[in-house]
Amino acid sequence: MMNQRQRYARNDDDRVKQSGRPPTGQRVCFSFLVNAGQPQPAGDCRAKGCELWDYDGKTYLDFSSQLVNVNLGYQHPRVLAAMKEQLETLVTIAPATANLARGEAAKRIIGLAPEGFSKVFFTNAGADANENAIRMARMYTGRDKVLSAYRSYHGNTGSAIAATGDWRRVPNEYSRGHVHFFNPYLYRSEFNATSEQEECRRALAHLRRMIECEGPSSIAAILLESIPVRRAFWCRRKAI
């Protein structure tokens, strides 16, 4: 006799076989989605350049470069060659271990960084980088508060999601010391501005008052995105 969970799994497998598609999402819990009873996200089977193809053969243009990390395009031959070469040499290395590839990457990053930077701290991803940046700022200043914008996304880990300004932070505010402010956004201005110059001027005045009211001596850092809020979307090529 099958239990209820096994019957659901079997029904999922039967639907996959009938549709001719591989089981892309039936066993996956997706980030920031209502997973129960909702349609599964689009399944992509291959990509090249800036294009993606799903299992039905439909073509999409990826305007977001996945998580803004495929800026060179999918399957770039030089990237693939470098990856294959590294895989043949060494697949992975612990953070506390010196390595030639990591040292070369640090050297190149420092070459592009402003004057005064001499070391690079590598992390696993953007949220991890922000978590460590917040810790460093608090340790260096001895202060606690971190200011960030309401229209922002900094990651989905403990302090990173609390620093994030959008609705996803609300049920996850377990980290301490986070304060939010409105950044300039003329399209939906919080400051009744009529021009970009006026919007920026009023947003800066608002931020200054926030700092004054929160206490400058209590603020460890201000966390900002160079391009506010990742707005990721895919578009059917046929529709363009």
Image (cartoon, helix red, strand yellow):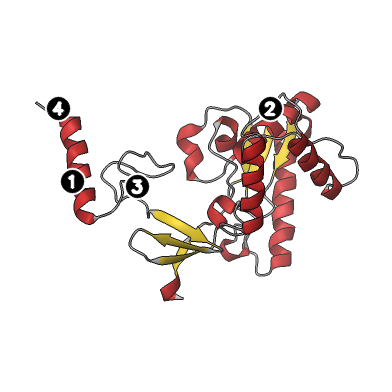
Q: Which residue is mark 4?
A: 3
Residue 158, numbered label: none
Mark 4 residue crowding within 10 angstroms, few (<14) / some (14–19) / many (20+): few
Q: Is residue 51 above or below residue 169?
A: below
Q: Which residue is mark 1?
A: 14
Mark 1 residue crowding within 10 angstroms, few (<14) / some (14–19) / many (20+): few
Quarter of the picture containing the N terminus is: top left
Mark 3 residue crowding within 10 angstroms, few (<14) / some (14–19) / many (20+): some
N-terminal-most mark, 1 or 4: 4
Look at label 4 and name its amino acid: Asn
Residue 95, numbered label: 2
Contact, mark 1 vs mark 4 (Cβ under 8 Å): no
Question: In x, y percent, where is residue 225?
Answer: 67, 49
Q: Which residue is mark 3?
A: 24
Helix, strand or loop under label 4: loop
Q: Is residue 123 visible?
A: yes
Q: Is residue 141 above or below residue 73?
A: above
Helix, strand or loop under label 3: loop
CA gap between label 4 and label 3 equals 23 Å
Q: Quadrant of residue 228?
A: bottom right
Query: Is 109 left or right of 1, judged from the image as shown?
Result: right
Q: Is residue 11 above or below residue 67?
A: above
